[in-house]
Image: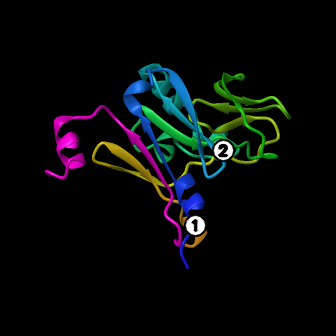
C-alpha cells in the first residue's frame, strides 16, 4: 500500500534559503505542522553555544540541534500542549509560547515555563544544495521531505536539466 497523492503532496516543500536574510525566520507548513527555519547570525550562534547545558531542563548542546550552525530547522509546536510559539520573542531571544508562558532560546531549547522538552528537530540531512528531512517515526513507510534550496549554482542547474 502506498500513500495517497494528497499525503505525498504535503510531504515535500521547497524553500529558497537565499530568500531568508540572516537574523530572520521563515515558517513553512509540513505535514500539517509549522516548521521554523532560522538563518542565525554569528552573535546568535555564539549565544547558543555559551549556554551551560547542565542548567537546561532538556540538556542539548547547540551542535546537537543543528547540522550547520547558521541554519536552525525545528518543528514549531510547543512541547507543553501543542501551541505554536511566537518567534523572536520571550526572555531568551528565541521563541515564546503565550498560551502558557514557555520560553525557548535561539536554539529552540526550553528555558522557562511548563514545556518539558526542547522544540523538536526533524530528521534531516544536507544533500548538495538542499536539506532533506525524513520522518522515521512513521515506521519508515513514508519519506517526508523538506527541501531547502540555497542559491542555484551552475552545477545545480545542470543537475535539474539532467546534465550532471
Relative to 113, 60 lies left or right = left
Question: As displayed, is residue 38 above or below residue 80?
Answer: above
Q: Quadrant of residue 51?
A: top right
Numbered tag placed on residue 118 in the rendering = 2
Relative to 138, 98 lies left or right = right
Give, as a single range, the part of the protein colored magenta: 140-164
Q: Which quadrant: the N terminus?
A: bottom right
Residue underneath mark 1? 4
**Which residue is found at the position 30% from the left and 42% from the top?**
129
SS state under label 1: loop
Q: Distance between the residues labelled 1 and 2?
A: 32 Å
Residue located farthest toward the right when viewing the structure as drawn: 100
Magenta span contains residue 152: yes
Task: Residue 79 in the image: state x and y as whole percent.
Answer: 74, 47
Crowd class of label 2 (few under 14; some 14 to 19; many from 20; radius 10 Å): many
Task: Residue 115 in the image: state x and y as whole percent.
Answer: 77, 43
SS state under label 2: loop
Residue located farthest toward the left when viewing the structure as drawn: 163
**Which residue is found at the position 53% from the left and 74% from the top?**
2
Question: As displayed, is residue 50 above or below residue 68?
Answer: above
Relative to 54, 147 lies left or right = left
Task: Give the label, 1 or 2, closer to the camera.
Answer: 1
**Which residue is found at the position 54% from the left and 51% from the top?**
122
Q: Nearer the viewer, residue 58 or 5?
A: 5
Q: Which of 56 and 89 is in front in this view?
A: 89
Q: Which of 99 and 64 is in front in this view?
A: 99
Question: As displayed, is residue 56 above or below residue 96?
Answer: below
Magenta span contains residue 11: no
Among numbered discs 1 and 2, the one appearing first in the sequence: 1
Task: Residue 124 in the image: state x and y as whole percent.
Answer: 45, 52
Amino acid at each position: 500500500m502506498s500513500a495517497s497523492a494528497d499525503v505525498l503532496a504535503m510531504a515535500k516543500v521547497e524553500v529558497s534559503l537565499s530568500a531568508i536574510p540572516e537574523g530572520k525566520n521563515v515558517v513553512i507548513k509540513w505535514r500539517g505542522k509549522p516548521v521554523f527555519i532560522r538563518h542565525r547570525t554569528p552573535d546568535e550562534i555564539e549565544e547558543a553555544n555559551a549556554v551551560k547545558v547542565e542548567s537546561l531542563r532538556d540538556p542539548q548542546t547547540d551542535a546537537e540541534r543543528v547540522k550547520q550552525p547558521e541554519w536552525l530547522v525545528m518543528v514549531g509546536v510547543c512541547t507543553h500542549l501543542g501551541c505554536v510559539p511566537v518567534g523572536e520573542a520571550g526572555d531568551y531571544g528565541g521563541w515564546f509560547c503565550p498560551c502558557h508562558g514557555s520560553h525557548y532560546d535561539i536554539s529552540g531549547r526550553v528555558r522557562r515555563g511548563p514545556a518539558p522538552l526542547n522544540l523538536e528537530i526533524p530528521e534531516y540531512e544536507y544533500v548538495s544544495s538542499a536539506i532533506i528531512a525524513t520522518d522515521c517515526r512513521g515506521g519508515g513507510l513514508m519519506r517526508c521531505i523538506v527541501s531547502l534550496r540555497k542559491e542555484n549554482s551552475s552545477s545545480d542547474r545542470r543537475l535539474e536539466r539532467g546534465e550532471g
